[in-house]
Amino acid sequence: MGLHWHPQEPGASAGREPANLDASCVLFDEEGRVAEVVHPGRPSNANGSVLHTGDSPTGASAWDDERIFVFLEALPDSVSALAFVVASANGRVFSEVPGASCHVSDRVTEREWIRLDLTALGKHREHRIATLRRGPAGWQISPDAQAARGLHQDPYGMEADHADL
């Protein structure tokens, strides 16, 4: 998963700190409970099969500001699903973040499966981008056209024992 946004123009929002978006990956067990969360403050899950490239507080990168790499073949068997989430770390709504977008791509071929214009999401501060589910035929991906709830209070979803997959 890749996350990108443009840095704030000088004087664009006088007195406000620049937008800071964070990418996260939530790992779920077979019961739908949160098993682990990978985010800028915890850049790897326990076995290293999900890796976050680190926090970019400014959006100043020429390409993706933050990336999460998932090595599906190395995920523990107990992980049944993954959800990719983007949240505003400082409360700015997506419509105030110029050029904010994210994509989910094959890490080897860079073939894009899902792309989302976050700026067009308006007054939301967090959004679930996609969910990967393990099934008998392997992993299936589906886009999630829903705002995530409560992440600005619990940015990494650790308060919830179960999640709405």
Image: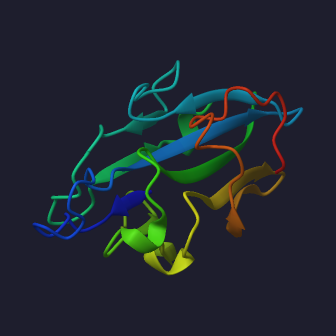
Can residue 77 be spotted in the picture? no
Write the residue at 40% across / 27% down: 41
Where 55 falls versus 34 (above or below)? below
Q: Is residue 82 visible?
A: yes
Name the image quarter holding the N terminus.
Answer: bottom left
Is 72 located above or below residue 36 in the figure? below
Q: From what the image shows, is residue 103 above or below residue 81?
A: below
Instruction: Name the residue located 10 percent from the left edge and 66 percent from the top edge.
Output: 10
Horizontal relation, residue 157 to residue 56: left or right: right
Q: Residue furthest right?
A: 31
Left/right of residue 155 with respect to residue 149 in the rendered view: left
Give the quarter of the image for residue 26.
Answer: top right
Q: Residue furthest top?
A: 46
Task: Give the quadrant of residue 97.
Answer: bottom left
Give percent across and percent down for residue 158: 67, 27
Q: Which residue of the protein is positioned furthest toward the bottom in this rendering? A: 120
- How far from the left and from the top, in percent, is residue 128? 63, 58
Q: Nearer the viewer, residue 109 or 40?
A: 40
- Residue 138: x and y, percent? 73, 54
Tell me residue 27's x, y (percent): 66, 36
Q: Nearer the viewer, residue 6 or 71?
A: 6
Q: Residue at x 20, y 65 (%)?
A: 8
- Residue furthest to the front: 15
Q: Nearer the viewer, residue 11 or 3?
A: 11
